[in-house]
Image: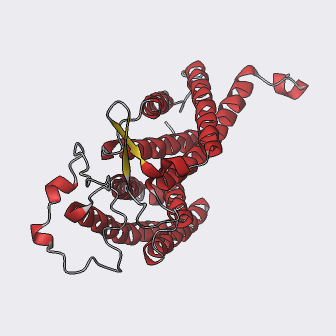
Amino acid sequence: MPAHSSGIVPAHARSDSLYTLLVFVALLLMLIAMVFSAWLRLSGSGLGCIEWPACYALIQSQPGGTESLAAAHLVPAWATVIHRLVATTLGVLVLGIVMSAWRCRGRPGQSLFIPFAVLGMTVFLSVLGYKTPSPLLPWVALSNLLGGMAMAAGLWWLGQRAVSSVPIDDRARRLRPWALVGLLVVFTQIALGGWVSANFAALACTGLPGCGNFPWLDAPWRESFNLLRVLPVTDGGAVIAGDVGKVVHMTHRAGAVAVFLYIGWLGWRAIRLGGRYHGTGMTMLALLLLQVLLGIAAVAFSLPLAAVTAHNAVAALLLLTTVNLTHLLTPRA
């Protein structure tokens, strides 16, 4: 008589259940940490402050020659404490996921690369958060954002591989390369959005749809995407966005058009496949429309903190939906 028929759960089944639980709890905490991180970063830069927009992108000098965001003191202490507690708990769970994956390394379809990649990103973000360099270095904010997004994507992939093993047909398999391109498109657009925030370029273009009569042929394109640049500031401590800010901001808007067209087409193709792909395609289109509306509202209503934070959160959900479609189109090893 099999062990499970007599009420005894096999050891490997208990291990798989624990692994799945750890992954999904870690994913939930990751999403919470990302929303808190976005809110802390955006409110610290001045969004939502009483003296808007005069309080946006102000830098103050600290003892020891370092700089910090002047509006950071307005962020409530409880939000910072919650973010740190969630991040610490998340780190413990990721370590548990890696240990569980290592024990199951001999089983078919069990990935070790993604759990260790998530652990590596956890360590990197922990070090970056413990000793954060000056906010005048845009690569810091960009690394935090993309590291969090990549962690969430990796955890979602692990979770889906742990609970789903449905085979795919040849018709669906042909869509997989396009889904992988969709992942790249969404991740690149998230990076462009993070670059706007990191360069304090949100107010560089306040109209819709363009940025006035800006001379794009003579724009500082190379400097605008220099990952090692240090942001210039006025004598009063205000970050100077200038022409670089206009280029960065409008590039993000152009990327939004590209994402809308490509992900809209990809979601439509998923709906046409039917079956379990239909729901993912519908979710993709709904999130895509919501993201566009939030982006337009953020510009039209002068960057309300809630709208911009929601814009970050929906971007993460859109990325996870694209990961989910890629998973559904990927056969198990």
Q: Work out which residue is located at the far right of the displayed protein and give it.
A: 6
Classify 146 as above or below 169. above
Q: Quadrant of the N terminus?
A: top right
Q: Quadrant of residue 66?
A: top left
Front one among 216 and 77: 77
Residue at left offset 57%, top offset 24%: 95
**How many numbered markers are drawn?**
0
Residue 26 in the figure: left or right of residue 198 = right
Front one among 313 and 63: 63
From this viewpoint, is residue 2 visible? no
Residue 17 in the figure: left or right of residue 268 = right
Q: Quadrant of residue 90?
A: top right
Front one among 275 and 249: 249
Residue at left offset 49%, top offset 28%: 119
Residue 326 in the figure: left or right of residue 1 = left
Residue at left offset 16%, top offset 59%: 221
Q: Work out which residue is located at the far left of the displayed protein and give it.
A: 218
From this viewpoint, is residue 220 visible? yes
Q: Position of residue 229 (x, y in %)?
A: 22, 46
Q: Position of residue 195 (x, y in %)?
A: 33, 54
Residue 67 in the figure: left or right of residue 104 = left
Q: How is the image coloured?
A: secondary structure
Q: Position of residue 146 (x, y in %)?
A: 41, 45
Q: Position of residue 86 (x, y in %)?
A: 63, 37
